[in-house]
Image: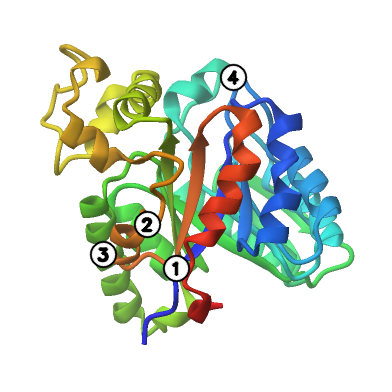
Amino acid sequence: MKRPLRLSLSLAGMSPLPPALDLVEVAEACGLDGIWSCEQIGFRDALVPSAVAAGRTRELEIGVVGLSSATRHPGLLAMEVASLAEFCPGRLRVAVGAGDPGLLAKLGQRVTAPLSDTRALVRTLRDAFAGRVVDGERGPFRFEEFGLNGAPLDVGIDVMAVRPRMLAMAAEEADGVHLSMGSTPGVLRESVAAVEEGLQGRGRARGDFRVVATCMLAVAPDHETARSIVRSVVSMAEPDMAEYLARDVLTPGALHGGGAASLSDEAVDELAVVRTPDDLQGAFDRYAETGIDELALFLLAPPDSQPDLVRRIAATRDPREE
């Protein structure tokens, strides 16, 4: 029997942190499963808000997504995550990857070997958290008998993946995979199938591996207003990547011509969950049917309405799943 879909919140780094962090206590009180803090270059980091969220909760899983060896030395990253793990022992998860080339360019960084660098980062973190000494070359970095004091630590390590080779590597090396916001249910289903094929080829159990997807939840008094909110968010995305994540509904160049404003209602409804406040029951069923294990919701609603929205989200869950 398939496990019930985990529901969590995604705190994107572009959101003002104080009101966003107020949601963590509501999420825990309502019985949601976790909260992911997302790091985005030029906005806010993910580790500081995660530490605040850890201090405000006792059971909620704390997730950090957007970490990369292009922005931090892996040894320093291991130290930072270890400090965070002490605030929430046994309930911390991190999602690492190569990073967005366009955003990394703002820091004067380039992604030259995304697959091998991410693999090296996963292995380095795993060794450090297990208390093993890290020595020699690890991707673009060199270590000389680096060890993490206070290890071993119980920290789940996921890989942020979009394309087939990164999905396959995640199935080889990681505890899970984190799929990008903007992926349609059809693309999510395709990604899950690719991951499961990789796990089977490695003799790994599917039940020990977590597939997390992030999606937008746009809530407004009417569907047309909610769709306009989604279009405004999509307009800020890199067009080629957005088209790839929704390749089953967007043709190449769809976002280069008229842009997001030209998206049909049907396309918008595939890119996000579009609902009114009283129309949330069953909103996430089509995502559960893709085979993912967890859906992290990025709330597109006014901050003052979000606590009530979180309660409504929690109320959609079947009590038999608890």
Question: What percent of the width, then of the height, locates residue 60?
Answer: 71, 62
Which comes before the other along the chain, label 3 or label 2? 3
Task: Say whether marks 4 and 1 touch (CB < 8 Å).
Answer: no
Q: Is residue 209 above or below residue 214?
A: below
Q: Is residue 32 left or right of residue 226?
A: right
Which comes before the other along the chain, label 2 or label 1? 1
Label 2 element class? loop
Between disc 4 and disc 1, the foreground one is: 1
Check disc 3 and report the residue beneath it: 194
Label 3 element class? helix
Check disc 2 and report the residue beneath it: 284
Check disc 4 and report the residue beneath it: 107
At label 2, the amino acid type is Phe
Q: Which of the 4 image quadrants contains residue 222?
A: top left
Q: Nearer the viewer, residue 85 or 73?
A: 85
Q: Is residue 280 above or below residue 174?
A: above
Between disc 1 and disc 3, the foreground one is: 1
Image disc number at residue 5: 1
At label 4, the amino acid type is Leu
Which comes before the other along the chain, label 4 or label 3? 4
Question: What percent of the width, then of the height, locates residue 100?
Answer: 45, 31
